[in-house]
Image (tube, helix red, strand yellow):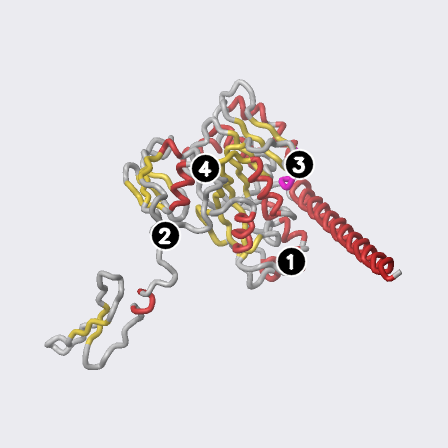
Amino acid sequence: VDCNCILASVLKKLVNTWVLLETNRSTAMENSDKTHQQVSEYYGKTLSKSADLKTDACCTSEKPPAYLRDVFSLLHTAVTDKYYGCGLVMPEQLEGRSVLDLGCGAGRDVFVISNLVGASGRVIGVDMTKEMLDVAKEHEQYHAEKFGYPKPNTEFVEGYIEDLKGIKSNDMDIIVSNCVVNLSTDKEKVFSEANRVLKEGGEMYFSDVYASRRLPEHLVKDPVLYGECLSGALYWNDFVNLAKKCGFLDPRVVKYSKLNIGNKEVQQKVQGIEFYSVTCRLFKIAELEPDQEDYGQIVMYKGNISRFPDSITFDEKYTFQTRKTKSVDGNTYRMLKGSRYCEYFDFIGTFDHHNGPMGDFPFSSSTECCAPAKQDVSECCAPAKQDDGCCPVAKKPKTDSGGSCCG
């Protein structure tokens, strides 16, 4: 009898737990669907053009290079008027590639990239807002003719960026996205799906909005702030950890800028929180390490990427000048050698000898002995750096004129 009572108690707890989990899952799905609907209505109906935005979070202030301005001039105004983005998401060397745009909207970036990939490449745009996709689809043939293509190399799919069920695994060379990931209610699924559909060596190159701290729940639930790409923004450190969890082991920042929240009502709501537009690149390369390590490796850019004969900027740390060697960490070496950039660089070095981290070791003794020296009233103290990198105090007498030598 005691056994039956125990079993009944255990079963009751299991049933209650299952009911609670199902209730939470159902609530989460309802909240997600509600947010999707609010965002879709905001961009499909509330906003008729980019000028209707209340902040500059979904606006690109960055001046495009000349070759992109030439492409922009070919775009239909019906498409450009409905552009909402916070950066330029056109990485180098796209010719002949397969590119996926997450949250493509009316298709501005899709059509620009369709020009850059050429007639042999292809671009797929995914968006959940039918009104925006209708504009994009209506102008596919227009842009194909403008670019001199026999037929469109673009495709627009209505769907969610958290569920790319129409895209095969390991099928895309590059994924781009422009100020859209912050609008997702399940960002982990976005990055997991992106990792799934990318080929090994492929990359996700995207711009998005990030916050200086985690946002309180009442701001997250504000529909206007969410639609303006603010209250759905990830705290930066949470993004880095999430990207690594989803298989992008070394997120790289290409460029960033602080957002100016011009609307006073919005300013009041988000007081104390800073927002940044950040362009990142995430490479799908299995061998990447959690940190940037020094193996004594060197690379040299050949200068043979079209439109970039003199130099190419890889991220905020590395800009490569043509025919000039540059020391790089092991992850950067792998990113360049294991991706579409391989044929544009010469590579020197192996992974046989590890020199430690790329940069200062966190427990280096030089940080202890290089503290600012306390000046003596009768003697002048200047730091004299030795060969071992340590900076003891080297004392020198005052000058004959009585002036100080410590200026």
Rounded to the nearest whole Å, what is the CA distance between mark 2 and mark 1?
39 Å
Name the amino acid type tagged 4.
Answer: Pro
Mark toward the start of the polypeptide (1 vs 3): 3
Residue annotated with mark 2: 358
Amino acid type indicated by mark 3: Gly
| Residue 159: numbered disc | 3
Q: Residues within 10 Å of mark 4 (few under 14, many from 20)?
A: some
Name which of mark 2 and mark 4 comes first in the sequence.
Answer: 4
Residue depth check, mark 3 versus mark 2: number of the one nearer the observer:
2
Task: Name the residue at 14% across, 78% down.
Answer: 402
- Determine whether the residue tagged by mark 3 lies in a helix, strand or loop: loop
Residue at disc 2, secondary structure: loop
- The x, y position of residue 169, in whole percent, is 58, 33
Query: Is 315 located above or below residue 388 in the figure?
Result: above
**Location of mark 1 (residue):** 219
Q: Report the mark closest to the observer, 1 or 4.
A: 4
Q: Looking at the figure, which quarter contains the C terminus?
A: bottom left
Image coordinates of residue 170 in percent, x first then y, are: 55, 33
Q: What's the CA distance linking mark 3 and mark 2?
A: 42 Å
Give the residue furthest to the right: 1
Q: Can you give x and y, in whole percent of width and height, for residue 14 in the image?
A: 79, 54
Residue in view at x 59 percent, y 48 percent: 182
Which residue is tagged 4?
91
- Disc 1 crowd rating (10 Å Cα; few below 14, some 14-19, many 20+) is some
Could you say whether the residue bearing mark 4 is in a helix, strand or loop?
loop
- Numbered mark located on residue 246 in the image: none
User: Which contiguous range is marked in magenta?
Assistant: 158-163
Front of the two marks 1 and 3: 3
Q: What secondary structure is the magenta-colored segment mainly? A: loop
**Mark 3 or mark 4: whose residue is earlier in sequence:** 4
- Of 7 and 201, nearer the camera is 7
